[in-house]
Image (cartoon, rainbow, N blue to C red):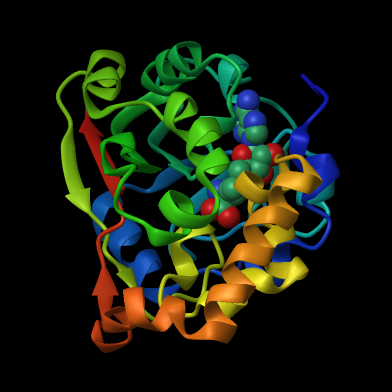
Amino acid sequence: MPVPAVYDAIGQAYHRTRQPDPRLAQAIRTALGDVRTVLNVGAGTGSYEPADLQVVALEPALTMIRQRPVGAAPAVQAVAEHLPCADKAFDATLAVLTMHHWQHRAAGLAELRRVTRQRIVILTWDPAYQEAFWLTTHYFPAILELDVPRFLSLSELARGLGEITVQPFPIPHDCQDGFLGAFWQRPEAYLDPTVRHAISGFAQLQPAVVQDGLAHLAGDLASGHWEAQFGWLRQQTSLDLGYRLIIASR
Ligand SMILES: C[S@@+](CC[C@H](N)C(=O)[O-])C[C@H]1O[C@@H](n2cnc3c(N)ncnc32)[C@H](O)[C@@H]1O
C-alpha cells in the first residue's frame, strides 16, 4: 500500500553517508541466528540484509527503493502497519532504525509478530538515554523533543513483543553508518549538510533551529570550548548512547 513517505523527501542522498557498519552488521547477523528467511521492514537502501539469508525488503519510500544496489534482495513497497504477507510467512523479521518513523508503532509490532515464525530483531534507541549525548543535550535539544516521544521505551516494546532480550550496541568511534549518534567523536561531521541530510532528526527540524545549533557548535569547536568539555571522548573507542538490539523469540 503506497503512502506518502518522509524518506521520499529526505532520503535522496541516503546511500552517500548511510553505509552499513560491519560491527553492527555482525551483531545483527548473530542476533538473527539460525533462520533462513527474513523480512526486512523499513529496509531503506538495503543495509544489514545478510547475504547468506533469503531476504525480502519492505519499504514505503520509492526514493529509498531506487537506491538499493544492483543484486539487492527484492523490495516491496508497503508499510509496517499493513504487511502484505501471510501469517508466519518468515522465519525472522528485521527492523533497523525504522520503528520511530511508523505512524502506528503498536500496529506495526503486532504485524511483525503476526508474520514471524522464529525471531524478531529490532535496532532502536532507548529514550531513557536522552542525557547521554552531547550533541542533543548541548546543541540540538529540539532533536530530543522530536525523538523522545517517537522512540518506544523498553517496557512499551515488551508490551508489544512479549519477552525481549536487550543488547546494548555501543557506537564505535569510527562508525561507518552515519546515523545521529555515529559521529560522537567527530563533531565536525555534523557541520556537513550531506551528513545532516541523511539523519531524520536534523532533516525534520525547522531550518532556523538547525542554524542556531550549528552556529553554537561551530563556535565551540573554533574556540576550543568543545574540546575542553568533551575532548576526553577522543580517547574512547566506543560509546553507549542508548542504541539497543531488541530480540524477541516466538
Ligand atoms: C533511518 S531509515 C533506516 C533504513 C534501513 N533500515 C537502514 O538501516 O539503513 C528509516 C526507514 O524507515 C522507512 N519507514 C518510514 N515509515 C515506515 C513505515 N510506516 N513502515 C515501514 N518503513 C517505514 C523509511 O522510509 C526509511 O527508509
* Tally of numbered tags: 0
Report the residue at 26% width, 64% height from top.
170
Instruction: Tell me the residue at 37%/48% (across/down).
Output: 36
Could you say which is closer to the camera, residue 86 or residue 17?
Answer: 17
| Residue appearing at x 66%, y 50% in the figure | 202
Left or right relative to 177: residue 27: left
Residue 72 appears in view = no
Residue 108 vertical position relative to residue 74 in the rendered view, above or below: above
Q: Residue at x 25, y 52 (%)?
A: 31
**152 with respect to 202 (left or right):** left
Q: Quadrant of residue 27?
A: bottom left
Expressed as whole percent of the image width and height from the top left, the position of residue 46 reads 62, 57
Q: Is residue 117 left or right of residue 6?
A: left
Residue 103, image x, y percentages: 61, 18
Q: At which x and y percent is residue 73?
A: 64, 54
Instruction: Look at the image and tell me in which quarter the N terminus lies.
Output: top right
Q: Is residue 90 above or below residue 155?
A: below
Depth order, front residue of 230/144? 230
Considering the image in quadrants, where does the C terminus appear?
A: top left
Residue 95's place in the image compared with 88, above or below, is below
Ligand 1 falls in which quarter?
Answer: top right
Residue 75 versus residue 246: which sits nearer the camera? 246
- Using the image as rendered, state which of residue 37 and residue 190 is in the foreground: 190
Q: Is residue 203 visible?
A: yes
From the top left corner, tell me how far across and down residue 165 is, in percent.
15, 38
